[in-house]
């Protein structure tokens, strides 16, 4: 009987701790679909620091979107589908790694959590999902007290080696090794490893250097920086789906900067950029898609401009041709 | 109402006729207000409105727009307005003949649309054949009426070009080649003013006395007609742009493109009169609180934002002030700023009424305001033109020519002709008077 109570209490405490570490509480307050939370679907929304850059400015504040709630939802759902995966498995053929992935968070002392088991790899769940823009981070042990662990041979990786992560449904993403760096345990460039970036990166961390018995840890950390190999096919499909186009016919006409609409589904509006020196451009206006495609500037004659198309999912096209030419 | 108008016209005609017969002509200062220039302006209005309404109706019809029917009705109304004008110059019989040829030619427009919608090539060929027939028939009519002052070949050539403009605007529109469509629209629109010039010159040459020996192609008359075309094209494009914008039509950006092209033309015209600095100032005023605000009105309607609407209207009011002041300063007070502001605001109200009626779904009212607002622009052409000509008489002075041919006889043998002559003069001046009244009414 005592044992039963003991186990129940311990179990409940463990559950609470797990829940806390995986940010469930934060997510519950944000979502009515808790079953998704355990898979971290909504984690990027709960962590302001690591949201993709395009979500920094709410689109519906920047642009007025007319009767397009359905379209908007459709594009945002599509976006969700295109979002990264929740990794459950990792393979690194060149060093014979074939391991499952568990989710880790941030420990009370501020450290990134590590997997419980030596043969498992931990994915930093509050961070970026593999496949998304940003730095996704995986950490694995180099050794245990008794011998080598999952990332024992991580330092043998070479530039160009493949890292393959997959989710429960078997969706695979391949990353390729770009470079490897060792940093002192106490002085690693956290921002470079975890912080925002325009690229789709996956960074692998393990211990390296000599084991410091006093500190109870190795004195250095090995970081393997890898970048997503964009699968050719899906990318084309994505482009077809959104048909990303920069505006055409950008012209300065008197005090007007004018252009022609991009006539595809899913355009929220346009951003106008202005430059005095022809090199540094600054955003000066956001024009919703239903408005006249023009921006008024008294000093139009003395400046140059380009315009970009902004889609409902936040994607921004390449700049148009600069006007006046 | 119509009877009242007719009576007024008659009175006006008599009033106009009396001084023209009684007084000697003073040609020392150039003026836009001559009977010949009035005739040209009346034709400017009727012919260009015909083009604008024909192309608009065809586009609306092709799109199955709710206002297609009312657009065609307005087109027919425009044709009906031409008949009294023709009658006053050439008599009822000729007017009836004119009406038969001209009004019926409007019926080909729906045939082109129907053929395009159903892809019926036989129907299209038939419609084209009918157009050819119209060009032939109407060209002959004009040549006969003007007693060859407008030669049949020249008339047919220009009529064929006009029909080509309408069809090419429509075809490009159907093919979604909007830039070409609005390029053709603009070219076709301005061709109507060329036709008007040729026709009014032919008529005034044919009957010089009825037009007090004034000419329809003096520099002053040219200026008035240029201003007519710029002002009326602005109205036509503004009305169209606002409807297309509200509908979020796929050619919306190209109507705005056409507006920008129009602004450039207007700017060039101002530059030729007031220099580059004045032109730059014009452009700034014209675009910022005007073209821009006009588009803000659309956005406000789409977003159902009343505050935005109020702001846009305030901008338009500011434009009326600014543009009135610009015109007042430029013409050195020959067009007083206050009067100019008032006229500009009246125009803006007509643009707004046309748009608001359209948004409300009252298409009959929309085309009524359209025609009223369209006609109003020719009053602006007249008033502004006169102010400019008065300001710089040297630039608009015509060639120095004697007023009348030398009096080389005393009329003993040709006395009988003079009464007929009087009646023709009466009719012609009545036409000029009618044109004047239409503008007067619009001005009120």
Image: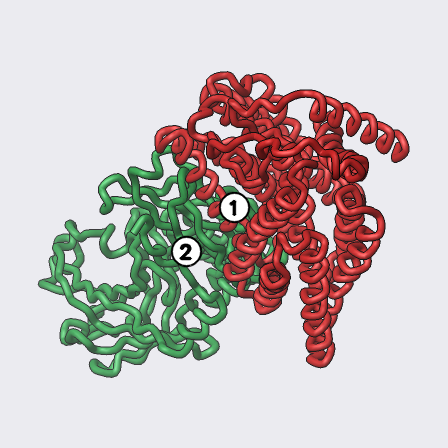
How packed is label 2: few (under 14 Cα within 10 Å), some, or many (20 or more)? Answer: some
Tell me the red chain. B
Q: Say the numbered circle drawn on residue B259.
A: 1
Q: Residue B141's spot in the image, x, y percent?
A: 72, 59
Relative to A150, B338 lies left or right: right
Same subunit, tags 1 and 2: no
Indicate the chain on which mark 2 is placed: A
Q: For this rendering, which residue is in front, A5 or B67? A: B67
Residue in view at x 72 percent, y 41 percent: B371
Residue in view at x 73 percent, y 44 percent: B358
Q: Quadrant of the N terminus of chain B?
A: top right
Q: Say the numbered circle drawn on residue A249.
A: 2
* Residue B292 appears in the figure: no
Which quadrant holds residue A174? bottom left
* Residue A233 appears in the figure: yes
Residue in view at x 47 percent, y 55 percent: A260
Residue lying furthest front: B412
Q: Quadrant of the C terminus of chain B?
A: top right
Q: Residue B295's spot in the image, x, y percent?
A: 57, 41
Q: Residue B313's spot in the image, x, y percent?
A: 61, 29
Q: Say the numbered circle drawn on residue A211.
A: none
Q: Is residue B233 above or below residue A87?
A: above
Tell me the green chain. A
How packed is label 1: few (under 14 Cα within 10 Å), some, or many (20 or more)? Answer: many
Residue in view at x 45 percent, y 50 percent: A270
Mark 1 to mark 2 CA distance (whole Å): 15 Å
What SS does tag 1 mark?
helix
Relative to A267, A119 lies left or right: left
Which quadrant holds residue A98? bottom left
Name the image colouring: by chain
Q: Is residue B213 above or below residue B206?
A: above
Q: Residue B124's spot in the image, x, y percent?
A: 70, 75
């Amino acid at each position: 009987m005592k044992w039963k109570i003991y186990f129940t209490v311990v179990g409940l405490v463990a559950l609470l701790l797990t829940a806390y570490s995986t940010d469930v509480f934060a997510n519950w307050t944000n979502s009515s679909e808790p079953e998704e939370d355990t898979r971290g679907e909504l984690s990027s929304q709960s962590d302001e620091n690591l949201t993709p850059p395009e979500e920094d400015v709410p689109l519906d504040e920047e642009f007025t979107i007319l009767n397009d709630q359905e379209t908007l939802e459709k594009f945002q759902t599509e976006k969700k589908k295109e979002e990264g995966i929740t990794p459950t498995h990792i393979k690194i053929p060149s060093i014979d790694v074939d391991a499952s992935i568990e989710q880790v968070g941030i420990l009370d002392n501020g450290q990134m959590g590590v997997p419980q088991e030596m043969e498992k790899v931990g994915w930093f769940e509050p961070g970026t999902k593999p496949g998304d823009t940003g730095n996704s981070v995986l950490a694995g042990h180099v050794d245990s007290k008794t011998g080598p662990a999952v990332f024992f041979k991580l330092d043998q990786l070479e530039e160009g080696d493949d890292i393959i992560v997959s989710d429960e449904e078997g969706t695979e993403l391949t990353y390729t090794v770009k470079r490897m760096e060792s940093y002192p345990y106490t002085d690693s460039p956290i921002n470079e490893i975890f912080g925002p970036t325009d690229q789709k990166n996956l960074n692998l961390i393990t211990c390296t250097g000599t084991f410091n018995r006093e500190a109870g840890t190795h004195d250095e950390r090995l970081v393997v920086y890898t970048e997503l190999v964009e699968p050719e096919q899906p990318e084309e499909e994505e482009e077809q789906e959104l048909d990303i186009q920069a505006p055409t016919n950008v012209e300065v006409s008197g005090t007007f900067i004018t252009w022609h609409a991009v006539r595809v589904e899913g355009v929220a509006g346009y951003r106008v950029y202005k430059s005095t020196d022809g090199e540094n451009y600054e955003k000066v206006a956001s024009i919703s898609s239903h408005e006249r495609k023009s921006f008024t500037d008294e000093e139009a004659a003395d400046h140059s401009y380009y315009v970009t198309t902004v889609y409902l999912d936040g994607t921004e096209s390449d700049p148009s041709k600069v006007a006046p030419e | 109402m119509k009877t009242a108008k007719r009576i007024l016209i008659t009175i006006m005609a008599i009033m106009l006729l009396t001084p023209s017969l009684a007084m000697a002509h003073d040609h020392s200062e150039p003026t836009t207000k001559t009977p010949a220039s009035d005739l040209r302006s009346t034709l400017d209005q009727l012919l260009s409105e015909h083009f604008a309404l024909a192309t608009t109706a065809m586009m609306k019809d092709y799109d199955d727009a709710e206002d297609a029917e009312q657009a065609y009705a307005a087109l027919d109304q425009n044709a009906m307005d031409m008949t009294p004008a023709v009658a006053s110059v050439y008599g009822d019989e000729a007017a009836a003949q004119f009406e038969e040829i001209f009004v019926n030619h409007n019926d080909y427009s729906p045939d082109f649309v129907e053929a395009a919608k159903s892809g019926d090539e036989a129907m299209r060929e038939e419609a084209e054949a009918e157009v050819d027939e119209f060009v032939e028939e109407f060209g002959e009519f004009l040549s006969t009426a003007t007693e060859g002052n407008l030669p049949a070949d020249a008339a047919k050539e220009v009529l064929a070009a006009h029909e080509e403009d309408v069809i090419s605007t429509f075809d490009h529109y159907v093919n979604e080649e909007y830039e070409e469509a609005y390029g053709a629209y603009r070219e076709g629109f301005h061709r109507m003013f060329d036709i008007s010039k040729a026709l009014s010159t032919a008529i005034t040459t044919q009957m010089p006395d009825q037009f007090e020996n004034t000419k329809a192609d003096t520099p002053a008359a040219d200026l008035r007609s240029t201003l007519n075309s710029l002002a009326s094209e602005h109205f036509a494009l503004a009305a169209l742009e606002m409807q297309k914008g509200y509908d979020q039509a796929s050619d919306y950006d190209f109507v705005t493109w056409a507006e920008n092209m129009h602004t450039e033309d207007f700017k060039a015209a101002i530059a030729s009169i007031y220099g580059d600095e004045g032109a730059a100032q014009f452009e700034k005023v014209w675009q910022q609180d005007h073209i821009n605000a006009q588009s803000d009105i659309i956005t406000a309607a789409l977003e159902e934002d009343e505050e935005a609407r109020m702001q846009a209207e305030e901008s338009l009011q500011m434009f009326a002030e600014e543009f009135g002041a610009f015109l007042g300063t430029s013409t050195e007070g020959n067009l007083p700023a206050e009067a100019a502001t008032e006229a500009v605001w009246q125009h803006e109200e007509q643009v707004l009424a046309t748009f608001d009626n359209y948004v409300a779904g009252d298409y009959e009212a929309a085309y009524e305001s359209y025609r009223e607002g369209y006609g109003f622009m020719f009053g602006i052409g007249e008033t502004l033109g006169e102010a400019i000509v008065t300001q710089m008489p040297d630039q608009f002075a015509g060639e120095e020519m004697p007023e009348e041919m030398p009096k080389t006889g005393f009329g003993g043998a040709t006395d009988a002709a003079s009464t007929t002559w009087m009646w023709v003069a009466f009719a012609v001046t009545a036409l000029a008077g009618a044109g004047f009244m239409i503008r007067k009414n619009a001005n009120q």
